[in-house]
Structure formats: C-alpha cells, structure tokens
Amino acid sequence: MEKLPHLLSIFLFIALHFHGGKVVAFKTQDGSEEWGYVQVRPKAHMFWWLYRSPYRVEDPSKPWPIVLWLQGGPGASGVGIGNFEEVGPLNTDLKPRNSTWLKKADLLFVDNPVGTGYSFVEDKKLFVKTDVEAATDLTTLLIELFNKDEKLQKSPLFIVAESYGGKFAVTLGLSAVEAIEAGKLKLRLGGVALGDSWISPEDFVFSWGPLLKDLSRLDDSGLQQSNSIAERIKQQLEDGKFVEATNSWSELESVISIKSNHVDFYNFLEDAGSDDVATLELALYKKISMKRYSRYLTSLRSRSRTPGGADDLDTLLNGVIKKRLKIIPENVTWGGQSGAVFDSLAGDFMKPRINEVDELLAKGVNVTVYNGQIDLICSTKGTDAWVHKLKYIMHLFLS
C-alpha cells in the first residue's frame, strides 16, 4: 500500500527568529508537514504550509523539486483552494487525492498577498497596492524559510501560478533573482509556470467578444457592446487610468454575463446560473467576479463529493483545519480580509506584466505558459495574443 501523507498528526512547536523578522511554525512529528506565519512587515503576517513528498526520490543528478503554488483573485487562498481543491494531498472531504502533485514535488502553499486566506494584517493600511509590493513580501517569506534550511536550498523552486497569481509569479521571479544575485536569498530558482495567467488584461478583454460570438453565445449587438467596452479599457490603460480600467472590466463582465445568458467565465461550455451578476450593482461586481472562481471549483467538487463530506471550503478552513493547525489567531477568519485585498489592488489589477516575462527570459529563467482550453476569463486566444508580444528571441519559439 502506498504511503499517504497524514493530516496534522502529532504537533511539534518551534519558534524561529531570522533577519529581524519572525517565523512561528508547527510541524508534524515525522517532518512531513510544516506550517506557520512569517511577519513579512511589522503587523503583516503571511501564512504558509509546506508538504514534503512521501514519494521523494533522492538523485543528485536530478534534485527533487519544490513547487510554490500561487493562487489568483487577487485574494484567493492557495492554502485553501490550491491545496484542498486542486493539487494538495487531501481533498475537501479530507480523503487522499490520487492526482496530488506531491507525487512529483514537495508543495509549498502560501496565502498571498497578506490578507488572503489565513494571512492577515493588523492595520488596513498594510494591504499591498501593487504586484511588486506583493513580490517583496513573498521574497521576505522565502528568505525566512530557505536561508536557514539547507535541505530546502538543495531543491530547485518552481513558482507555479494560476490566474491573477501569474502576475505575482513574474514579479516574484524577478524579485527572487535580484535577491539571489545580491546574496540575500539562498535558493535555486528552477523556473516559473504561468497557468491561465492574467498577464495582459487588455488582450483578454478583447478576446471575449469574438470568442463568444464564434461559440454562438453572443449576437452582433453583444459583440459590439463587448468590443466597445474593450476599446474604452484600452484607452484608459493608455491614459494611465488604471482604477477606471478595473471598473470598466467589471462592467464588461456584467455585459458579457447578461448578453450571453450567463456564460460560465471559467468554462464557456456551461452556464454560471441565474443568480449571477445581471441584477447587481456595479459596486458589487469585483466581489462577484472573485466568487465566480470559487463557485466554479465548488461545482466541480460537488460532482464527486462523498456522503457526509465538507459542505464548503469556508466551513472546512474555519472549522476542523483551523482547529488542527493550532496557530491561527482566534480573531482571524479564513478569507475574512480577501475582499479588501482585491480592492487594494484595484490600481494594479489591469496593468500588464508582459515586460516582466521578457525580463525573466532575458535573465535565463525558464518560463512555461500553459492554458485551459475552455477558460474564458484568461482565454487561450488572449494568452496567444500576449505571448506574441514578447520581444525576447521569440523567433526561436514562434513560427
């Protein structure tokens, strides 16, 4: 029988102090799991959870990798969604996942930026306002975790991101390379993987109308409205009106939803349901857009849920998981500050990160781009458009 990772068996408390920062962590007796907080700035606390793979193969010629998983949103929890709903060792029913990525790597989940998931700030002024600020916090976390752990240093770290997490991944990649070159971070960066990543919002919003028209989900009137708002977004981005562009994006999502009879933004072959954004005010659009992602994953989970399983991720993370972790402050609710995380990044949400991908390539960092075929919000059509805008020796990659 295969050895399976346990969920939080026997706890061993350790408290570490590095570089003037602070790490407070627990780990299982066998060392297979470790989790805790890093104070990345005074009163700003980032939660992380590391799983060491039971399938690890020791081969000096091919070091066992570590995957750092970054979720989207912004404000979506890697510790919750990425871990229990996608690639971690256990599903939301706390049953072993046959397809866990632990079979190929150790897994490091981080609730990023601060305020996401179990991460929290003690002062609302401490929410990050830019992707670069988020990358700085993540780099601080990596310094605290890796610099005193020689075992971690031996494994190449691959930054793997989903949706908006792709913007964090490329800015973190650059920040990490800079810290490594300066001798501040003892880490081997294996590469960056961008999955359905929100790298060029302009290219994505221009893809929605034509794609849905080709799928017979929009008529000519809907296509015209979609393209008109996309043109407005383009102009706002050129004028540096980034918050206005974010609001226009929210408006465009609502128009798309109404005109397409509520197409699912994460699976254009399905409908999102009649309770979507059509009748809601503009002020609520951003929150509803985040909830679409959670609803999509919930729908996938419900198809395979076992009798008596967890009703939803909020119940699981604020119940049994919080209790077993033994480190989450009583006044911290999983996801309680996520809406504020999104709002704080409104001025950066629509900014592209194509240039940062070019910079990573120029520095010799391996960058992998992959995309889901039926994703609408980060469509393959939009991804193809921004990839063709890369300047770094693209003649070697594109025909």
Image: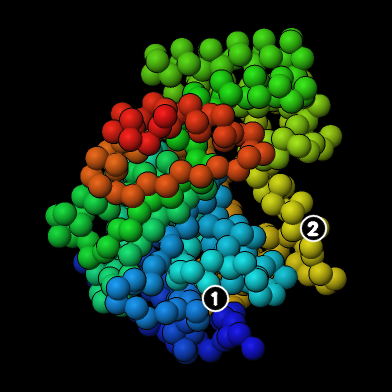
Mark in the foreground, 1 or 2: 2
- In the picture, the quarter occupied by the N terminus is bottom right
Going 71% across and 47% down the picture, which residue do you hit? 296
Image vertical order of residue 229 relative to residue 291, above or below: above
Tell me the quarter of the picture where residue 146 sits. bottom left
Name the spot of residue 59 as percent of width and height, x first: 34, 78
Q: Left or right of 201: which side holds 175?
A: left
Q: How many marks?
A: 2
Identity, as a three-letter code, of the amino acid under mark 2: Ser
Residue occupied by mark 2: 302
* Disc 2, SS: helix
Going 66% across and 24% down the picture, which residue do you hit? 211
Residue occupied by mark 1: 325
Tell me the quarter of the picture where residue 131 sits. top left
Which residue is the extreme one toward the front? 399
Specify which label sits upstream in the sequence, 1 or 2: 2
Q: Is residue 368 visible?
A: yes
Image vertical order of residue 302 relative to residue 199, above or below: below
Q: Which mark is residue 231?
A: none
Tell me the quarter of the picture where residue 15 sits. bottom left
Name the spot of residue 12 as percent of width and height, x first: 45, 87
In front: 123, or 196? Answer: 196
Name the spot of residue 106 as percent of width and height, x first: 45, 71
| Circle 1 crowding by C-alpha within 10 Å: few under 14, some 14–19, many from 20 | some
Residues under numbered marks 1 and 2 in contact, where contact means CB atoms less than 8 Å apart: no
In front: 344, or 104? Answer: 104
Going 43% across and 60% down the picture, which residue do you hit? 68
Q: Is residue 48 visible?
A: no
Name the spot of residue 228 as percent of width and height, x first: 60, 10
Q: Left or right of 179: which side holds 54?
A: right
